Image: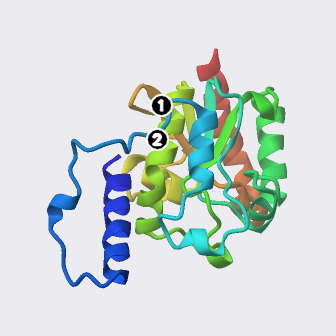
Amino acid sequence: MKNLKNALLLKQLYQLKQLGYKYTSASIYKDDEPDLSLPNSLEKLKEQAMKCHLCELSKSRTNVVFGEGNPQADIMFIGEGPGATEDSMGRPFVGRSGELLTKMIENVLLIKREDVYIANIVKCRPPNNRVPTPSEAHTCQPFLMKQIALIKPKIIITLGGTAYHYMTGDETGITKVRGSILQQNGYTLIPTYHPSFLLRNPSAKKEVFEDLKKVKALMG
């Protein structure tokens, strides 16, 4: 929530500047003033995310890609950010990477895609599919953290180094940490490669297969 509050404060200060203020008192914003809390339902949270203009990505997006799947899923996948196909359709992982992710879920975990929940670190597409900046990721983070709090997954699988970094704060490369089993905040986190990496490096699929076998074992 702190990141969201800071972003809202910064937006307010910019608005005052545009109105001609040269400076303003910090007292315009107080923690005990209200209500910046996020909604306690996925539907309301999605409505709020759809209206978000707190970072630069909102200026170039076609659609907000909130996330989709079972709102009570035991397993949640978190990627980096929407690509071109996702931006045009407003859904996560629906391009070539999405097709591969669906196969990973259905052929290895032996469950349907709609039985898991899929989201990203940022909900708007970074231009040219670049990596989200720290500012963009941290501004969007409260939405993702609230999704996790509402869904309460038992297992989170981070796809790629960016998702792993922002979910853990650890900057270790994905090649060194993939397949690790980490416990944090009431869920098990397992990092693995992003499907787009597998499209470029098909030989790494066997490593992801091993990672997902660990997930399947944890599922019981």
What residue is shown at x 57% (from left), y 28% (from top)?
151
Residue 175, visible in the rendered structure: no
What residue is shown at x 62% (from left), y 24% (from top)?
74
- In the image, 150 versus 12, the foreground residue is 12
Query: From the viewer's perspective, is residue 45 above or below residue 137?
Result: above
Residue of label 2 = 145
Amino acid beneath label 2: Met
What residue is shown at x 84% (from left), y 50% (from top)?
99
- In the image, 7 versus 155, the foreground residue is 7
Look at the numbered disc 2 and give the secondary structure of its residue: helix
Quarter of the image with the C terminus is top right
Query: From the viewer's perspective, is residue 148 above or below residue 12?
Result: above
Q: Are marks 1 and 2 in contact (CB under 8 Å)?
A: yes
For label 1, the crowd category at 10 Å Cα-Cα, with few meaning under 14, some 14 to 19 and many 20 or more, is few
Query: From the viewer's perspective, is residue 38 above or below residue 111?
Result: below
Residue of label 1 = 149
Classify residue 19 as left or right of residue 137. Answer: left
